[in-house]
Image (cartoon, rainbow, N blue to C red):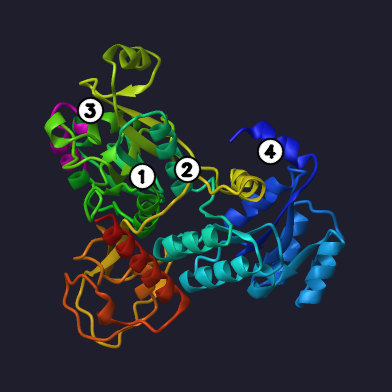
């Protein structure tokens, strides 16, 4: 996209948005950025606590009198006509407010689908921040939007969209993407003096870690030693699988394996890790998605929730020149890592809003297929009637290990992780069981219908191709 085109269009029109789930950190960063962009206007903000939204708007510097609490459609329309921001607890009012774009940021899987469909009915594009909903229903919702001449898209500023964009950029340049991935959420900070590693607020002894600081020629062995030394610390998290599910569906890249490799890796090592086993790396196949855990010293930069791709090099001379300019080229010169070491949440999201509203384009040129499914495997025995409750900051199901599987004939009965969430088990399950749809009492819902529709359309398309 040519950004000067957007500037020109904003001279003659503005873009309005409705935001559902407007008191999260993402929402705050978007609203704060909106204050700096004359051509962008929040029309409706929705949260269960409108009074809290009122306070938030004041904190962010919106002029007093430009935002008002409303709970009827007529009041929302009046606020819009007066150029004011409507604050409401009604997600239906927000979804049907005829804003250019509806942003869904509740994190509730079922709500995400319902809000998106309501927005389509009202003629609005949809930006899906709710990755839990997107991982289950994104394929269906993208097709539903396209059938109406609308856009359904993830958001710039979040890792899935940033990585989809990076993969699309590489492919446009003719580069073969061997692997694509992201850093997991938090860094593992190694203190050489104390031989310890800090992860969030926890510090653990890491005796011997320094001996494995350099990757060396035996890459897999070094990574195994690092992981063993830090076995007290968590080394995987459910949101990573959810986000890579979205990337896989959008790019056609497949999971590297059901449980990601999660190497404890330094940035400069990625081009030697995410390459085929026969070249010294960890990949048993190429064209995959995966996640790594960043390990660094306190004086080194964070990856900051960034994303990366590893590509196959072509002309050796060209890439040796690029190595000399500081780019990450593998030891054997056959691969290179290209990365964006950050994601800026709502600070970047206005780019997606403008792309959708002004150009009718999704972020990253999205055309998703049901390539992968985020599934779950029991880590303990379960009894029939137990509810697979979702909780915590990372929206996890206690006792259920997340996996990312390719979608094919053998995995179609699998229950998507966030479709089974908050539903009862119909049968006893032993530890190590891959949970299938008929094991869970999943009632008919918009989310279930969207999952099945997306899967059926993909199966039909695959049959037609054959």
Give the CA distance from mark 1 to mark 4.
44 Å
Give the CA distance from mark 2 to mark 4.
19 Å
Are the residues flagged by discs 4 and 3 in contact, CB closer than 8 Å?
A: no
**Magenta span: helix, strand or loop, mainly?**
helix
Q: Which residue is mark 3?
A: 214
Give the CA distance from mark 3 to mark 1.
19 Å
Residue 391 makes an appearance in the image: yes
Are the residues flagged by discs 2 and 3 in contact, CB closer than 8 Å?
A: no
Mark 4, secondary structure of its residue: helix
Earlier-in-chain disc, 3 versus 1: 1
Q: Please tell me how crowded label 3 is: few (under 14), some (14-19), or many (20+) other residues with Cα within 10 Å.
A: few
- Location of residue 295 in the rendering, given as x and y in whole percent from the top left corner: 32, 38
Would you say 16 lies left or right of 271 here?
right
Give the CA distance from mark 2 to mark 1.
28 Å
Earlier-in-chain disc, 2 versus 4: 4
- Frontmost of labels 2 and 3 is 2
- Frontmost of labels 2 and 1 is 2
Residue toward you, 95 or 367: 367
Q: Which residue is mark 4?
A: 6
Mark 3, secondary structure of its residue: loop
Report the disc number at residue 162: 2
- Location of residue 370 in the rendering, given as x and y in whole percent from the top left corner: 34, 59
């Amino acid at each position: 996209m040519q950004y000067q085109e957007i500037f020109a269009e904003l001279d003659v029109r503005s873009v309005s948005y409705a935001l559902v789930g407007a008191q999260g950190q993402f929402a705050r960063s978007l609203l704060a950025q909106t204050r700096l962009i004359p051509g962008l206007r929040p029309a409706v903000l929705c949260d269960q606590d409108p009074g809290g939204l009122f306070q938030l708007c004041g904190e962010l510097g919106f002029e007093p009198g430009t935002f008002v609490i409303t709970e009827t459609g007529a009041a929302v329309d009046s606020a819009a006509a007066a150029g004011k921001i409507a604050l409401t607890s009604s997600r239906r009012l927000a979804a049907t407010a005829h804003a250019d774009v509806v942003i869904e940021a509740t994190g509730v899987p079922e709500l995400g689908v319902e809000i998106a469909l309501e927005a389509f009915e009202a003629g609005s594009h949809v930006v899906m921040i709710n990755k839990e909903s997107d991982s289950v229903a994104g394929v269906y919702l993208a097709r539903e939007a396209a059938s109406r001449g609308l856009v359904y898209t993830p958001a710039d500023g979040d890792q899935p969209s940033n990585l989809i964009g990076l993969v699309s950029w590489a492919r446009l340049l003719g580069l073969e993407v061997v692997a694509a991935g992201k850093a997991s959420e938090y860094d593992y900070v190694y203190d050489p003096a104390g031989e310890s590693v800090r992860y969030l607020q926890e510090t653990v002894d890491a005796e011997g870690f320094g001996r494995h600081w350099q990757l060396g020629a035996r890459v897999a062995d070094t990574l195994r030693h690092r992981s063993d030394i830090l076995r007290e610390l968590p080394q995987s998290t459910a949101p990573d699988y959810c986000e890579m599910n979205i990337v896989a569906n959008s790019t056609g890249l497949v999971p590297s394996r059901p449980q990601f490799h999660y190497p404890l890796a330094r940035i400069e090592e990625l081009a030697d890790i995410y390459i085929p086993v026969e070249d010294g790396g960890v990949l048993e196949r190429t064209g995959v998605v995966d996640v790594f855990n960043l390990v660094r010293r306190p004086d080194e930069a964070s990856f900051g929730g960034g994303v990366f791709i590893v590509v196959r090099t072509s002309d050796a001379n060209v890439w040796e020149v690029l190595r000399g300019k500081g780019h990450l080229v593998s030891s054997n010169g056959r691969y290179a890592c290209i990365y964006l070491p950050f994601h800026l949440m709502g600070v970047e999201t206005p780019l997606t809003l403008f792309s959708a509203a002004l150009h009718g384009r999704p972020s990253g040129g999205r055309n998703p297929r049901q390539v992968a499914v985020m599934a779950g495997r029991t880590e303990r025995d379960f009894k029939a009637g137990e509810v697979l409750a979702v909780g915590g900051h990372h929206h996890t199901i206690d006792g259920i290990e997340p996996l990312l599987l390719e979608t094919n004939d053998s995995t179609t009965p699998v229950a998507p992780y966030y479709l089974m969430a908050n539903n009862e088990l119909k049968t006893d399950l032993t530890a190590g069981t891959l949970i299938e749809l008929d094991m869970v009492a999943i009632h008919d819902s918009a989310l279930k219908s969207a999952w099945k529709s997306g899967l059926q359309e993909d199966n039909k398309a695959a049959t037609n191709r054959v």
